[in-house]
Image (cartoon, rainbow, N blue to C red):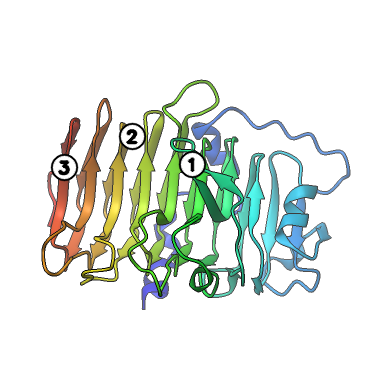
Amino acid sequence: MIQEALMDKSLKILAAVNMAAALLLLGPAVVLADTDGFVVHCAPLLFVGANVGDCNDFHPTIQAAVNHAEPGETVLLGTWVFDEQVLITKPLTLQGEGMGSTSIKPAVVSANTSSLFSGAPIAAILLVDGTAGVAVSDLTIDGLPAGSLFACSPGYVGIFYRAASGAIQDTRVTNIHHPATPGCQAVLGIFVQSANGGPGLNSNVAIVNNVVDNYGKNGITANEPGTFVTVSNSMVLGRGPTGPGDAAQNGVQIGFGARGLVSGNTISNHNYLPPDFVACGVLFFEGGGGVGRAKNNTFAGNEQNICTAGAGLANAPFNQ
């Protein structure tokens, strides 16, 4: 039901194949510099999917295809479960065959980056680091079984845009969670971070038409000055009610000076019992100079639909 609702192509804001071109609005111009005659790189070697006719070459892993791609090129993923963590450090399009067909589901993860704010280690399944114009679409990021094999350190993130910009669309991020230690705090479905802004450190990410569910602490998190996110037409589904020993969850957090628009989403099941801690559908936290806005969202089963805490500005008109 969730997948069918979100796969309606009439809701697309960015055309899947041409998404990278649309993303020029989000970052510096991407100049194609092809040197090998290949501009569409595919994985796995035995590619199954509707896009196979577009492939120029084939690779055994996503990382191998990404490494071979030049800035502005495309990596297509077939119907497959990929057991790997992926690092992207250049502008490109990463497109699967659909969230029900293409999965990145590592059996084991390890720390591959760190928080720009605290320096704490983070294990990210898909890490976009220090670049602009990265478009991710039509796949699933699945955090189990890897999340059951370690506790609260390193932090655990499904998709991490780290001083990076682009778009996430028609994608599911699920099971970013430690079932045996559910109270861990640095366990996030999607994380966008900018390290207080500055040259090369700003992050501008469109998060459109996705499903984020069964996460530890927050579904979608945008932190620090220099960060701007648009979260729209997505389903953000918490595990609530949670309780003692578990996390007080938030669906979408915009905090510590980040800015963002949260619009047209369905955000549900964020509540904590007994109500010793507050769980929020949307949390604007320590805004500082940031501005957050929420409008036209549908809420259900949240302890509080919209919360504001600390200094900063937020407004939430037209919500249901």
In this picture, residue 5 sits left or right of residue 80: left
Q: Which residue is mark 1?
A: 115
In this picture, residue 310 sits left or right of residue 78: left
Three-letter amino acid code of the residue under disc 1: Ser
Q: Position of residue 183 (x, y in %)?
A: 32, 64
Q: Residue furthest top?
A: 199
Judge whether residue 39 can be spotted in this image.
no
Residue 215 versus residue 121: which sits nearer the camera? 121
Q: Quadrant of residue 188?
A: bottom left
Looking at the rendered structure, the secondary structure element under dot 3 is strand
The residue depicted at 59 percent of the width and 40 percent of the height is 129
The residue depicted at 53 percent of the width and 37 percent of the height is 164
Gap in angstroms between the C-alphas marked 2 and 3: 13 Å
Looking at the rendered structure, the secondary structure element under dot 1 is loop
Q: Earlier in the sequence, mark 2 or mark 3?
A: 2
Q: Which residue is mark 3?
A: 308
Mark 1 nearby-residue class (10 Å; few <14, some 14–19, many ≥20): some
Three-letter amino acid code of the residue under disc 3: Thr
Numbered tag placed on residue 258 in the rendering: 2
Q: Quadrant of residue 285?
A: top left
